[in-house]
Amino acid sequence: MSQNKDPNWVATFSMQRNSDKFDANNNVIAGKEKLPDLVSVNSEKVNQKTGKPYRKNFTINGMWHEPSGYVQKDGTYKITIKKSRNVSSTPKSEDPLNFNYGANV
C-alpha cells in the first residue's frame, strides 16, 4: 500500500466478519460472545501452532497496531485500534511519517 497524498491520512486497512465468533448460519457461537465482530483480514502466512492464518496488521511510526470492530445495539460500529506489540520489538522507521505495513499485509 502507498501513503495517501492527503496530509491528514494516517492508515488504511480492511476488516472482515470474525469467523471465530460466528457459525455458518451467522449465529454467535456459544462462549464467543465477547470476541470482536470484525477483525483484520487474513494474511497468506499461517500460524504453525494453530493452523490458522495470521491477521494482517500495520505499523504507524514503527508501532504495530491491530483493528477490531464491534456492532453496537443501535446498529452502529465501534472500531478499536490497539497497539499489538511493544515498540522495542519492532524496528523503527527512519522517516517518522512513513506508515509501514507489516509483513502480514
Image (cartoon, rainbow, N blue to C red):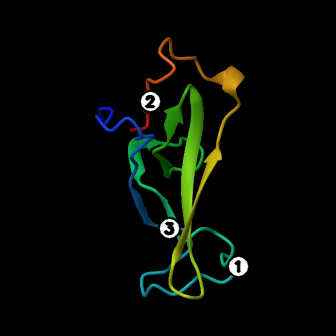
Q: How many angstroms separate mark 1 from mark 2 (CA)?
A: 36 Å
Q: Position of residue 65 (x, y in %)?
A: 57, 42
Could you tell me the amino acid type at mark 1? Gly
Mark found first going from the N terminus, 1 or 3 = 3
Please report contact status of discs 3 and 2: CB closer than 8 Å, yes or no.
no
Q: Position of residue 66 (x, y in %)?
A: 56, 47
Name the residue at 43% across, 42% down.
11
Name the residue at 45% across, 40% down.
10
Q: Is 80 drawn above or below residue 99 in the view shown?
A: below
Horizontal arrangement in the rendering, residue 78 relative to residue 89 (left or right):
left
What residue did someone put label 2 on? 99
Q: Secondary structure at mark 1?
A: loop
Could you tell me the amino acid type at mark 3? Asn
Q: Quadrant of the N terminus?
A: top left
Front one among 40 and 50:
40
What residue did someone put label 3 on? 18
Mark found first going from the N terminus, 3 or 2 = 3
What residue did someone put label 1 on? 31
Could you tell me the amino acid type at mark 2? Phe
